[in-house]
Amino acid sequence: MAGASIVLAVLFGVLFGVGKVSEHAWIRWPCWLVVEFFRAVPVLIMMIFAYFLYANYDVFASQYLALAGVITGLTLYNGAVIAEIVRAGVHALPRGQAEAASALGLTSGQTMRSILLPQAVTSMLPVLVSQVVVVLKDTALGYQITFVELVRQGTNVGSSYGNYIPALIVIALLMICLNFTLSWL
């Protein structure tokens, strides 16, 4: 679930982040509106909304509703945050980069793809890794819409054996190991 959300959020974020730095107002303003909207709405509300929307319109089979709701909420919220990261990364580059590309006759699209985004990735990477860790931790919110994820499974095991504290300590250690591994990678 976290992996799918991360991939979709990065695609969403790059698309809307590049849209926010577009020269064309008819691209920039709708991208700005979408990003600001999804950044403002809490991720849990998006999960619950998506869950009930999918259930109401039979978009997914019932066994996949919670999974789809969690992925949708995580994708939209984190995609909006990644869009801001992309926008900030591109704006952090020296203005001369785009001017030099323009002097060479590159279009704005070619400049973005070939010059600006590849350079911006290096400055964005630490923040992107931090956002990936946030996605992993936010998967625990899925319990609100009956999704059985790591924390929910730990509490289920803890209640079965009457050992909540040891079960939660194991879950915390697993999450720490996963987050350290992601940061290391």
Image: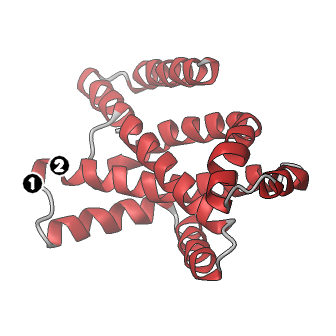
Q: Is residue 146 visible?
A: no
Tell me the kind of residue under disc 1: Ala
133 or 3: which is nearer to us? 3
Residue drawn at 80 percent across, 55 percent down: 98
On screen, residue 56 versus residue 17, left or right, reads: left
* Residue 61 tag number: 1
For the N terminus, the quadrant is top left
Label placed on residue 64: 2
Q: Can residue 66 be seen in this view?
A: yes
Q: In this rendering, is residue 20 above or below 64?
A: below
Number of numbered tags placed on the structure image? 2
* Residue at the farthest front position: 105
Q: How much space separates mark 2 and mark 1, taking CA atoms?
A: 6 Å
The quarter of the picture where residue 147 lies is top left
Q: In this view, does 150 lie to the left or right of 29?
A: left
Look at label 2 and name its amino acid: Tyr
Locate residue 108: give its quadrant: bottom right
Horizontal relation, residue 112 to residue 44: left or right: right
SS at mark 2? helix
Q: Check disc 1: other Cα within 10 Å, few if <14, some if 14-19, many if 20+.
A: few
Give residue 103's position: percent from left, percent from top: 83, 56
Q: Are marks 2 and 1 in contact (CB under 8 Å)?
A: yes
Instruction: Please state the horizontal and vertical placement of residue 142, each as a whole percent of the image.
Output: 36, 48
Q: How crowded is mark 2: few (under 14 residues within 10 Å), some or many (20 or more)?
A: some
Identity of the residue drawn at 16% across and 66% down:
55
Secondary structure state at the residue bearing disc 1? loop
Observer-nearest of 17 and 160: 17
Q: Position of residue 85 (x, y in %)?
A: 68, 51
The residue that appears at 74% across and 57% down in the rendered structure is: 105
Q: Residue at x 62, y 79 (%)?
A: 29
